[in-house]
Amino acid sequence: MPDAAANFDQTILPHLDAAYNLARWLIGNERDAEDVTQEACLRAFKFFDGFRGGDARAWLLTIVRRSAWTWLRSNRRHEEAVEFDEELHGGIDVSASPEVSLIRAGDVDAVRQAIATLPAVFREVLVLRELEDCSYKEIADIAGVPIGTVMSRLTRARRQLQTALSTQPQSGGLS
Amino acid sequence: MNCEQVQKLIHAHHDGELDVANTLQVDEHLADCPSCFNAVRQLSALRGALQDSELRFRAPTRLRSSITAAVEQAVRAERPAVITRPWYRQPAWSVAAVLLVACVLTLQVSFRRSDDRLLAELTSSHVRSLMVNHLYDVASTDQHTVKPWFDGKIDFAPPVKDLRETGFPLLGGRMDFLEGRAVAALVYGRQKHFLNLFVWPSASSSPAELRATQRNGYNVLRWSDGKMNFGLVSDLNEGEMREFVREWAAK
Ligand SMILES: [Zn+2]
């Protein structure tokens, strides 16, 4: 009979990169992201018994996200840790999007920098959607918000990213 | 739909999260609105930039081993408590069963979702290319002009063949986007019909059988020769499209 540790290896560990990626993007530095990821994995393991179906990856990401936000609240400036208030910030802006068709594949540093400057609530939906390929429904479950909120955050995240990238100096394009 | 409504939906459209009815309406709008169409292309460009694997952080080895060690320690510490539970309450059994089911379901669902998204993207790229009058970046019936045109624009060399003798003249080529990556689109004619052949490198080295699907009234044929993936989209009938695929393979 496989023991609990072997089960952990088969179910939680395959999603370690996804968990660390989310923690690392939310927290912004290696050491604290490692601590938060480890804590979340152990917590995931502890509540193994309570896990009743569903997606193991989404479940782990939910726990990682919660731990990361706890860390953000106690370690970051107030503004960063405040969850985004949709009421306060209005609806979707439909003004013309900035011209960014010239993002080059080699500009990884510029892209990384641009993501890092997004507010944490935008960063997390963007990372979950674009880097972890989560569906809107999965993101809504992980972040504990309605799908409409996921959509509006994603729109804003992309818009900000486009603006940030369009102001980057470019040495050439795909043309 | 007006621009404002469309702009609200293009993200869901781009993410393959829009229902069929809205997808059709958005596609229709994109067909004759250059500014909304441009917004879609920019989303594709952005996804292309985000596709770089360097952007995804990977868990350091020391974290992996530290977690494994901590779990083993926790297991050793908890073992006596676990043994007093009935067997079905023991983590190992219940979790193994539940996760096996969950993994199988997850695999199927995510496969179906990405497959569906690809199909939607193939069709809407085809529709857009026709309606926005952007069939080709390079208009040429000469494969020796079209093939080198892709050099430096995409990171692979697509095979380009002229099938004029068999009634499918090459008309040109352009760069397009599918699933966030730049792909080659070759345009062929058949009487008054246009065929878009999308070409991009295959992740697997084994060939994939031809699969024919219909979407929004267009026929989509997909296959792989083990090096490249092919997606052929047209309003032409399936029989003639299969003929194209045979001629392409034979050439
Ligand atoms: Zn419009």
Image: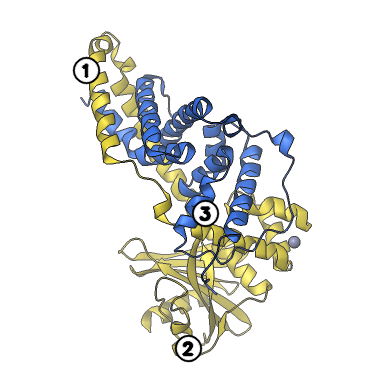
Chain colours: A blue, B yellow
Would you place residue B226 above or below residue A97 in this image?
Answer: below
> Where is residue B195 shown, x and y percent of the image?
55, 76
N-terminal-most mark, 3 or 2: 3
Amino acid at dot 2: Thr
Numbered label attached to residue B145: 2
Protein chain holding label 1:
B
Give ligand 1's quarter of the image: bottom right
- On the image, the x and y values in percent for residue B93 come to 30, 22
Identify the chain of the residue marked 3, using the numbered disc in the image.
Answer: B
Query: The residue tagged with tag 1: helix, strand or loop?
Result: helix
Q: Which mark identifies residue B201?
A: none
* Circle number at residue B116: 3
Q: Residue at x 50, y 59 (%)?
A: B49
Which residue is label 1 attached to?
A: B76
Q: Judging from the image, what secondary structure is the residue with disc 2 in?
A: helix
Amino acid at the residue labelled 1: Arg
The CA span between labels 1 and 2 is: 68 Å
Q: Name the residue located 42 percent from the left edge and 32 percent from the top edge.
A: A60
